[in-house]
Image: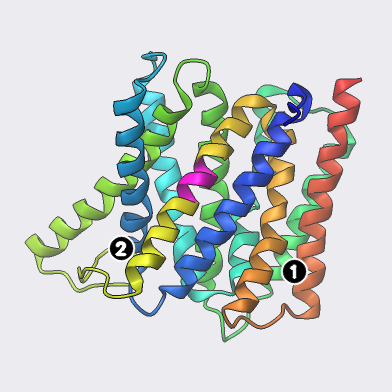
Amino acid sequence: MPSISPKYQGIFFMLLAALGFSVMGGAAKALKESFNAGQLVFWRNSVGLIVLIISFAQRPPVNAGSKPGRLLFRGLMGTTALYTLLYCILHLPLGTAMSYNLTSALFIALFSFLLFREYAGGAVLLAVLIGFTGMLLIYKPNIDLPWYYHLAGLISGVSSAIAYLTVGKLTQFYDTRVIVLSFVLTGVLTPLLFVVIKAVFHLPADELFFIDWRWPAGNEWWLVLLLGTAALFGQYFVTKAYGADKAGIVSAISYANIPFSIVIGMMLGDAFPDNISIIGICCIIGSGVLISFLKKRTAS
C-alpha cells in the first residue's frame, strides 16, 4: 500500500475521523428511545476505555508527557462537547446536529488566527462569515425546535474547537492514545459523578445529566458497542489529524461529516433537510472548502 505524503496525512486522518463520528451519531440516534445523553456519554466512552486499557497493556505509552493540567482541560472540553452533541442528536435531525458540532471548524479558524496567527488575510475572514451565515440559516428559530437545542449545538461547536486546539499542542508531549485517554476517562467519570449526585440528593432524571440507570438489553448491546468503537475510531484519527497538520487546515476537512450524517440520518428516519437548511449546510461546507484552499497557498 503506497504511503501518504506527510503534506496530506492530516486530511486523510480527518476523513477517517468524519466517517467514524457519523457512524457514532447514527448509533446514538438509534438508541434515543432507550437512553438520555448522559448515559450515552458513559457507554460511548466505556467501550473506548476498555480498548485503550488493552492497548496500553500491549504497548505502553512512548512518552510520559509533562502537561497534566492541559491534558485534564482537554478531557473536560471534549466531554462538554460530547454531552451537548449527543443531546442535539437525540432532539434534532442527525445532519443538523452534526452541522452545529462542525461549527467548531469556524471557531478553530477564528481562534487560530486570533491566538496563533496561523492564518492572515481576508480569505479566512470571508470563510468564517460564510460559515456563520450557514449556521444562522440552519438555526432559523421556530416553535417546533426550542432555543436551547440550538444553544446546545453552539456550545458543542465552541467546546470542540477549544478541545481540538489543545490537542495540537499536547501531541508534542504525549502519545496519541494518552490524549484520547484523557477524554475517554473524563467521559466515563463525569456521568458516574452525576449518578452519585442524583442518588444523594434524590434529584429527578433529565434529558442531559441525571440518569435513570439501566443496562442495555438485547440488540441495544450491539448498538452500544458500535457507538463506542466508531467513536474511538473517530477520536483516534481526529487526534492524529490535528497532530499532523495545522488546526485551521485539518478542521476544514471535518465537514465531510455533514453529508455522511445526512445519509445515515435519513436511513434512520430523518426527513431530508429543507431548502433553507440545505443552503445553510452548503454555506458551512463552502466555508470549509475555502479554508482548505489555503493549504495550497501555505505550502507554496
Left or right: 218, with 124 as reference point:
left
Disc 1 element? helix
Q: Which colour assignment does the render follow?
A: rainbow
Image quadrant containing the N terminus? top right
Circle nearer the N terminus (2, 1)? 2
Please tell me whether residue 241 is drawn above or below residue 84 in the rendered image. Answer: above
Please tell me whether residue 58 is drawn above or below residue 99 in the rendered image. Answer: above
Please tell me whether residue 113 is drawn above or below residue 300 in the rendered image. Answer: below
Left or right: 219, with 13 as reference point:
left
Left or right: 21, with 102 as reference point:
left
Q: How many marks?
A: 2
Most foreground residue, 225 or 73: 225
Residues in magenta, as a range: 231-235
Residue 285, picture quadrant:
bottom right
Amino acid under disc 2: Gln
Q: Residue at coordinates 7% horizontally, 60% vertically from top-left? A: 200
Disc 2 element? helix
Residue 258, picture quadrant:
bottom right
Question: What residue would you read off at disc 2?
Answer: 39
Most foreground residue, 139 or 290: 290
Number of other residues with Cα within 10 Å of mark 1, as a class: few under 14, some 14 to 19, many 20 or more = some
Question: What residue would you read off at disc 1?
Answer: 137
Q: Residue at coordinates 51% horizontally, 38% vertically from top-left? A: 236
Number of other residues with Cα within 10 Å of mark 2, as a class: few under 14, some 14 to 19, many 20 or more = many
